[in-house]
Image (cartoon, rainbow, N blue to C red):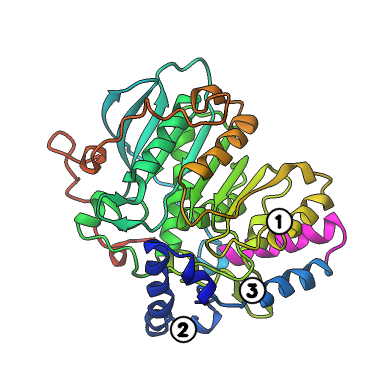
């Protein structure tokens, strides 16, 4: 990775650096398609910007972009081996006890995305449910520092609870190999994890809709690897209405983990795309890019955002794509990013922003209770992990 990135890195970016340099070797041993993979800093910043400029010149009409968007969506599904979707088996949710807090409740849940394959997470809802509520799918990134892991991070819990306090049903779920299932043997960086993780996200939409979420007000938002899941899900699942990927949409950086770039979703025979074009597939629905000066999104105001404005302009909807750039900030979904995202979600999902922010812009998160990681696990003595449950990706029957 480039020195400019390393100078602004925190510990998380160091972890991504390790992924980028070790990942291609692992993939080469596992996959005949390794030469079709675009991993990490696959391009320089200049190459990424040049690619977008050349692509933009190829489509000058809405019809031309729609054709391109269809090809991008097809490549994602082909690359993840999901062109023919698996049969959607019953979700069979295992529901934990409801815990009540100030303005919201939390319930730990596990459901089956495939027979015996469990997706674990926690559901956050407002204390009062007046009619149909909007739903928010919230995947997490690759945070693994003890006490600061995945969806259990204090910043993450504050976000889920605040969005619930604003009036949304929020499903915060574990990436493959994270959380309680990681302790049972699941690994994150093995096999076709990108395929399973995207499928789990699609089934998460099924799950939140099964709870009665408003099908006309569904959003997805996550940071880093969770940002990748956000724009991939938004690109392939038409049920998503609002998308807010945080610190991830980049013209030159393709994601450093197998769950982001370990299958050929960006490249095929006579085909090439990048994550900016993938984000553009969502047009003309509301899209917010949150970017910072301290990672691979540092060029967003001058490179990625103008390109997406062009795409949205082809559909006459330039007002539906936004960029909140925080030049002094680094990678994450911390306070400044939440200040950017909450108003966007409130506007597009018709939420009550006053429940999450004061009128002067400060976050209203002092009412949120940050729970211990294990308190957010769905399996326990009352709800044990089923004997038929799968604990390894190589045991899945697609």
Contact (Cβ within 8 Å) of mark 2 with mark 1: no
Say if residue 372 shows up in the picture: yes
Would you say the residues marked 3 and 2 are in contact, meaning their CB atoms lie under 8 Å apart?
Answer: no
Kindly give the residue lying farthest to the left in the view shown.
Answer: 381
Q: Position of residue 265 (x, y in %)?
A: 56, 68
Which residue is depicted at the point 61% across and 67% down? Answer: 75
Q: Is residue 330 above or below residue 339?
A: below
The disc at residue 32 is 2
- 127 above or below 383? above
How far apart marks 2 and 1 lie (CA) works out to: 35 Å
Question: What is the secondary structure assignment of the residue under circle 3?
Answer: helix
Disc 1 marks which residue?
A: 305
- Comparing 271 with 168, the one in front is 168
- Residue 157 lies in quadrant: top left
Residue 138 x %, y %: 46, 43
Residue that carries the numbered disc 3 in the rendered image: 45
Earlier sequence position, callout 1 versus callout 3? 3
The span shown in magenta is 59-76
Magenta region's main secondary structure?
helix
Seen at 51% across and 76% down, the residue is 3
Q: Residue at x 31, y 58 (%)?
A: 144
At mark 2, the secondary structure is: loop
Q: Indicate the quadrant containing the C terminus: top left, top right, bottom left or bottom right.
A: bottom left
């Amino acid at each position: 990775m480039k020195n400019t990135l390393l100078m602004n890195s925190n510990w998380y970016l160091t972890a991504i650096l390790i992924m980028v340099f070790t990942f291609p070797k692992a993939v080469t041993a596992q996959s005949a398609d390794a030469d079709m993979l675009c991993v990490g800093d696959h391009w320089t910043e200049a190459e990424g910007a040049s690619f977008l400029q050349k692509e933009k010149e190829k489509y000058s009409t809405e019809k031309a972009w729609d054709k391109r968007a269809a090809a991008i969506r097809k490549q994602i599904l082909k690359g993840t081996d999901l062109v023919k979707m698996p049969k959607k088996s019953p979700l069979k949710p295992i529901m934990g006890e409801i815990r009540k807090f100030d303005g919201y409740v939390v319930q730990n849940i596990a459901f089956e995305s495939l027979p015996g394959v469990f997706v674990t997470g926690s559901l956050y809802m407002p204390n009062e449910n007046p009619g149909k509520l909007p739903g928010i799918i919230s995947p997490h990134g690759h945070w693994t520092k003890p006490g600061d892991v995945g969806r259990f991070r204090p910043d993450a819990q504050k976000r889920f609870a605040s969005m619930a306090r604003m009036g949304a049903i929020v499903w915060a779920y574990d990436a493959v190999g994270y959380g309680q299932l990681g302790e049972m043997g699941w690994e994150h960086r093995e096999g076709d994890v990108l395929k399973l993780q995207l499928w789990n996200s699609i089934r998460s939409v099924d799950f939140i809709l099964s709870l009665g979420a408003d099908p006309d007000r569904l959003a997805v938002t996550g940071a880093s690897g969770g940002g990748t899941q956000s724009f991939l899900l938004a690109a392939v699942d038409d049920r998503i209405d609002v998308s807010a990927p945080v610190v991830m949409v980049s013209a030159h950086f393709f994601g450093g983990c197998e769950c982001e770039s370990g299958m050929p979703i960006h490249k095929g025979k006579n085909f090439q795309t990048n994550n900016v074009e993938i984000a553009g597939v969502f047009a003309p629905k509301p899209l917010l890019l949150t970017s910072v000066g301290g990672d691979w999104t540092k060029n967003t105001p001058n490179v990625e955002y103008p390109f997406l404005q062009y795409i949205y302009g082809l559909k006459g909807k330039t007002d539906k794509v936004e960029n909140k750039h925080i030049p002094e900030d680094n990678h994450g979904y911390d306070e400044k990013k939440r200040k950017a995202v909450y108003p966007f979600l409130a506007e597009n999902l018709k939420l009550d922003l006053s429940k999450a922010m004061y009128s002067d812009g400060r976050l209203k998160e002092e009412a949120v209770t940050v729970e211990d990681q294990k308190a957010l696990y769905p399996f326990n003595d009352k709800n044990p992990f089923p004997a038929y449950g799968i604990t390894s990706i190589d045991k899945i029957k697609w």
